[in-house]
Amino acid sequence: MQNTFVWEQVLIMKRLVLLLFAFTLATTVTAAENQKGDIHVGILISTAYPFLGTWGGEYYVNNYTQGIRHDAKLGKWSVGSDFEVIYFLDPHWAVGLKTGHNEFFQRVASGVDERVGTDIFNIMFLTKYYFNPKGKIKYYMPVSLGVAFIEANINLDRKEEFNDIGFAAKIGLGAEYDLTERWGTGVELKYNHNTFNTRETTLSGDIVKLYPRANYFSFGVSLFYKF
């Protein structure tokens, strides 16, 4: 009786090993390596929360009239989207262009009753390095440089808008999975850096200087098509 039980366990383990081997073989066969000349067109939907602090992911506000200095976050959590086109120079390297938009929803800032909301638009040059171009799941590092357009809405007694153009840079880590020969999906975690000029204005009769620091981490899910 005991021998029968042991043999049953051996057969179960054997079947599991065979199934695992078959799955691994299928994964290896269906993995499509990126080739020179390949073009990928994709979209990415992301979200972010500005938690890097006053000298990172927030505005620093100096009210000279009232003698008040305080932070003002970009807003609450955000919803963003990116559209990108990349061209493969070889299986490891790809270059391209991307555009993106991130909208941080309005929140009440600390220090005073100040409602802040921010929109950021990017146009950027993009490069990606793929660590394992032959894998079914491909891991890569995206780096992009370009221009950022910011629109900040700050509301004390009346609404003021700050519009500026600055420098933008992004770096992160991502993973892509081939759904079919043409379609793929992925996830991406990025650090987003945006630099803008200091702005001085008058809010409700007070002289206020705004130091924008729009830096934050974002997480996104992508869908792309391979030509």
Image (spheres, rainbow, N blue to C red):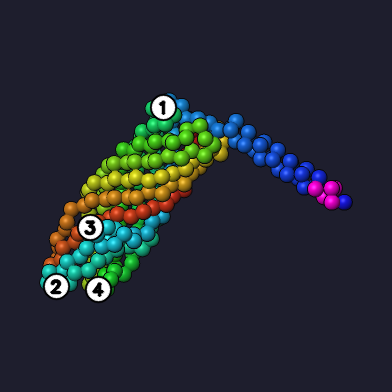
Side of 208 where 12 appears, left or right: right
Residue 24 position within the rendered picture, expressed as x and y whole percent measured from the top left? 62, 37
Numbered tag placed on residue 90 in the rendering:
1
Foreground mark, 1 or 4? 1
Sequence-wise first label, 4 or 2: 2
Magenta stretch encompasses residue 128: no
Q: Which range is magenta?
A: 2-6
Q: Which residue is mark 4?
A: 112
Location of residue 129 in the rendering, given as x and y in whole percent from the top left corner: 39, 36
Q: Residue furthest top?
A: 36
Where residue 212 is drawn, which disc sits there? Answer: 3
Q: CA distance from mark 2 to mark 1?
A: 57 Å
Q: Report helix, strand or loop for mark 1.
A: loop
Q: What residue type is disc 1 on?
A: Asp
- Which residue position holds label 2? 67
In this view, the residue in front, 207 or 211, is 211
**Horizontal arrangement in the rendering, residue 199 relative to residue 129 (left or right):** left
Amino acid carrying mark 4 in the image: Val
Residue kind at label 2, given as amino acid type: Gly
Crowding at mark 1 (Cα within 10 Å: few <14, some 14-19, many 20+): some
Which amino acid type is marked by label 3? Pro
**Residue 55 vertical position relative to residue 33 in the rendered view, above or below:** below
Q: Residue 192 in the image: state x and y as whole percent.
A: 32, 50
Q: Nearer the viewer, mark 1 or mark 3?
A: 1
